[in-house]
Amino acid sequence: MKVSIEAVVHEWVFPSRINVKFILLRGYHSWGIQSLIEKELCPSFKVQAIRAVKGMGLVGIGLLKLIPAAIQGQSARVNSLLYICRGAGTLAGLLGLSYQEYKNIHSDFGITN
């Protein structure tokens, strides 16, 4: 017997989380954290070198994608910038730098730092 369950789910998304800046910073942060964790778990030079090449590759791809994105519209430009931010985050993580995503509370909660 096959049972199928369906549900409608609604989720509130704060306006401060549906803009380009938030998306780019989120990409930078998440890829930077990945690098920080990998650096801690696999500190070998080979693993770190591969991660550095990946980071530089993401930045390079993003820069190359910016050329056609200039005429393709905002979505393509944001996608290109996201590659660059992910690559920059990867490299920052290798250097031990991290973006403190939750340092400031979003004003959507009615509280600001």
Image (cartoon, rainbow, N blue to C red):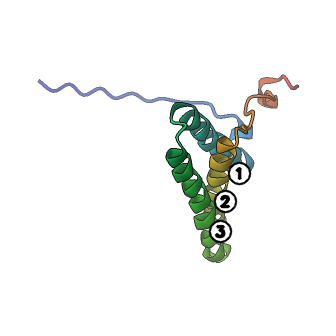
Q: Label 2's element? A: helix
Q: Residues within 10 Å of mark 1 (few under 14, many from 20)?
A: some
Quick one: quadrant of the N terminus? Answer: top left
| Marks 3 and 2 close (CB-CB < 8 Å) | no
- What is the three-letter code of the residue carrying label 2? Leu
Residue 81 relative to residue 11: left or right? right
Q: Closer to the camera: disc 3 or disc 2? A: 3
User: Label 3 belongs to which residue?
Assistant: 63
Q: Please give the label number shown on residue 81.
A: 2
Task: Name the one closer to the observer, 22 or 50.
Answer: 50
Residue found at x 60% / y 57%: 83
**Image spot of residue 35 (x, y percent):** 59, 41
Q: Is residue 35 above or below residue 106?
A: below
Q: Label 3's element? A: helix
Residue 6 relative to residue 10: left or right? left
**Image spot of residue 20 (x, y percent):** 71, 51
Residue 45 relative to residue 88: left or right? left
User: Label 1 belongs to which residue?
Assistant: 20
Q: CA distance from mark 3 to mark 2?
A: 8 Å
Q: Which residue is farthest left? A: 1
Residue found at x 48% / y 29%: 9
